[in-house]
Amino acid sequence: MNEKLLKGGVIVSTALLLALGFHFRSEPIPPPVAPPSFGKLILPDLQGTPQSLGQWPQRYRLINFWAPWCTPCRAELPMLIRLYPQWSARNIQFIGIAMDTRESVSAFVKTHSLPYPDLIGQDDTLTLTKSLGNAQQGLPMTVLLDHQDQVVWVKLGQLDEAELTQELARVSAEK
């Protein structure tokens, strides 16, 4: 009796697995999500004034998503501050998008003398980065845009100075 139940269970289980396999195999695969147009993004600056990332149309834009409470973000900021003058002179605009309150970010920026523009990310700002591989919406994340607002480089996690410098030199040479 137990042998008959076991054989019957195996047959039913196999049929169920085959049916599920055919069902899921026939599900349409959604098309890939196109990368967002960061150049059209408008966010408030530290004074609350709306600013467009498209206001630097002739420049490459290095957009760094960060937060004052994020340890790897804080670790990479001195490097970004140090590199900014050199790359700004080579037509690359650094922009910070901070994921925190305006008050908290303003105090941090003032204390650390960030020389480049910082904007305040909204609740859904990091959602834009999902299509670029940031499924967990983690920080820091850095995106490099070209003149046509196309994403040309993405780094999720803390920046490495050699890697960043190499990428900036590459796009600077393409201009």
Image (cartoon, rainbow, N blue to C red):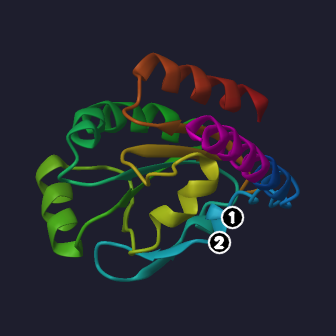
Task: Provide the residue designation for mark 1.
Answer: 37
Is 27 rendered above or below residue 21? below
In the rendered image, residue 14, in percent from the top left (x then y), is placed at 74, 43
In the rendered image, residue 42, in percent from the top left (x then y), is placed at 53, 76
Looking at the rendered structure, the secondary structure element under dot 1 is loop
- Residue at 25% across, 66% down: 100
Is 27 rendered above or below residue 134? below
Q: Amino acid at mark 1?
A: Ser
Q: Nearer the viewer, residue 22 or 7?
A: 7
Between the residue at mark 2 and the residue at mark 1, the CA separation in whole angstroms equals 6 Å
- Residue at 69% across, 31% down: 171
Whether residues under marks 2 and 1 lie with C-beta atoms below 8 angstroms apart, the answer is yes
In the rendered image, residue 162, in percent from the top left (x then y), is placed at 46, 16
Q: Amino acid at mark 2?
A: Lys
Q: Within the image, what quadrant is residue 117 found in?
A: bottom left
Q: Is residue 149 left or right of residue 156?
A: right
Task: Provide the residue designation for mark 2.
Answer: 40
Q: Residues within 10 Å of mark 2 (few under 14, many from 20)?
A: few
Q: Is residue 103 left or right of residue 33?
A: left
**Span highlighted in magenta in the image:** 1-17
Is 133 rendered above or below residue 56? above
Q: Give the quarter of the figure containing the C terminus.
A: top right
In the rendered image, residue 12, in percent from the top left (x then y), is placed at 72, 50
Q: Is residue 140 magenta?
A: no
Is 20 rendered above or below residue 154? below
Q: Nearer the viewer, residue 90 or 30?
A: 30
